[in-house]
Amino acid sequence: MNTKEFKKAVDLLYEEKGIDKEIIYEALEAALTAAYKKNYNSLSNVRVEINRETGEIKVFSFKTVVDRKEEEKYKKFSDIDFSTINDEDEADDGGEILPFIFDDRIHLTLEEARKIVPDIELGDTIEEEVTPKDFGRVAAATAKQVVVQKIREAEKNVIISEFADKEGEMVVGLVAMEDVRNYYIDLGKTQGILPKTEIIPGETIKMGSSIKVYVTKVDSNNKGPIILLSRKHYGFVKRLFELEIPEINDGIILVYSVAREAGVRTKIAVYSENERVDAVGSCIGERGSRIARIIEELNGEKVDIVEYTTNASKFIENALSPARDVHVFITDEAKHEAMVIVNDENLSLAIGRKGLNVKLASRLTHYKIDVKTIEDAKAEGINIVE
């Protein structure tokens, strides 16, 4: 790789991948410096410089101007027996003297340096070019590695930036592969991971089929971007409603909260600030057409659409659907605790199988709900007027 080809490669990376040229040059200089040290058994006092205009590569060795007397100070310091020092301050002061050993491969005395540069000072450096004749071979191999690495980094960053704002959103992909634990969903520029624990219980995922998924996390590791997906997350239902109900997407109907037990039941609370809009009816659709499409996507999962209201008692009553004739008492508004009294006929409906209905209602309303029968309430001295 000659200097023109080298510069052309950098320009091409900038144009096609949008990687800043200076970032590429700095990465190449660092990599070439390391390659020089490895291949030519060099000490650390070298640097590689790439001419940004021509692409020419040069290696420089530098020596630092030091005070030779510092070595003698350190030698005297290292002979001190600190076990004989009782004064802590004295020991601390002595500890400020740092180790220094003069090495003529990396150091120059001030006297030697001033023979070359008369006005040079301690701490300055003197450089000389030490570019080997065959360094182009090493540079070409190293540059190839750096370029490949930068391309991977650029592609990873593009994918991450593209999907970063999709966290918490729904995307559509193709089922590309599967292994024991995961499905891999083709999302265009990258693949997302859909763990088998995150699919809807009982559903069948077919290879090559189009699938709607919810993005739960966008991250990266050494191997590239990681996009975690789910169909089990409650957010998946919320995004489905936004997709299928135009009024939600337009902001006419608002979603207050969603509670879900994937594969079994979902409760979603909706409302509208426009009194003329029937939020629940709009979500159900004519003859149940809208909710039917959502249920089909959820593999038959039951969906309760609940009307949200700022009246906590009424909201809890709505959330306990399909139970009816429930009496709600807010027992502690600050702690969000409520007691619900129902007749025997509605007790099992209010609680639900394995307590699921009341559990989902509690999640939906953010209230701890204690369900009692009328008989239990009377036994506790609570009288209900039916």
Image: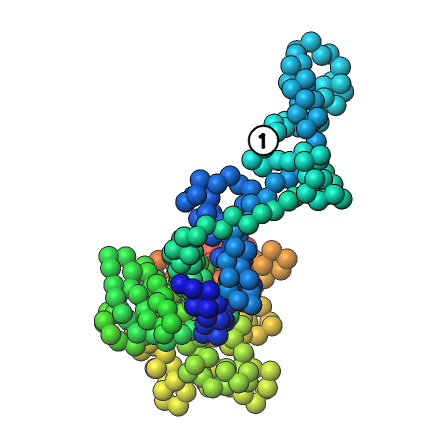
Q: Considering depth in this image, is 234 or 61 the residue closer to the camera? A: 61
Q: Is mark 1 on a helix, strand or loop?
A: loop
In the shown orientation, is residue 333 left or right of residue 179? right
Q: Which residue is drawn at 56% across and 42% down?
A: 45
Horizontal and vertical percent position of residue 112: 67, 36
Q: Which residue is situated farthest in the front direction here?
A: 115
Q: Quadrant of residue 156?
A: bottom left
> Residue at the location (57% across, 74% down)?
309
Q: Residue furthest top?
A: 84
Q: Choose top left, top right, bottom left or bottom right for residue 205.
A: bottom left
Quick check: 286 left or right of 69? Answer: left
The kind of residue on which mark 1 rests is: Asp
Q: In the rendered view, would you say 223 is above or below 384?
A: above
For label 1, the residue is 103
Whether residue 1 is visible, yes or no, is yes
Residue 365 in the image: state x and y as whole percent: 52, 65
The residue sitting at 46% across, 79% down in the picture is 242
Q: Please name whichever residue, 63 or 386, is drawn nearer the observer in this view of the structure.
A: 63
Closer-to-camera residue (54/381): 54
On the image, which quarter does residue 100 sit in?
top right
| Quarter of the figure that contains the N terminus | bottom left
Q: Pinpoint residue 194: horizontal percent, then vertical percent.
A: 33, 64
Q: In this view, does 214 lie to the left or right of 45?
A: left
Is residue 342 visible in this depiction of the protein? Answer: no
The structure residue drawn at horizontal position 51% and vertical position 64%, both measured from the top left corner, is 55
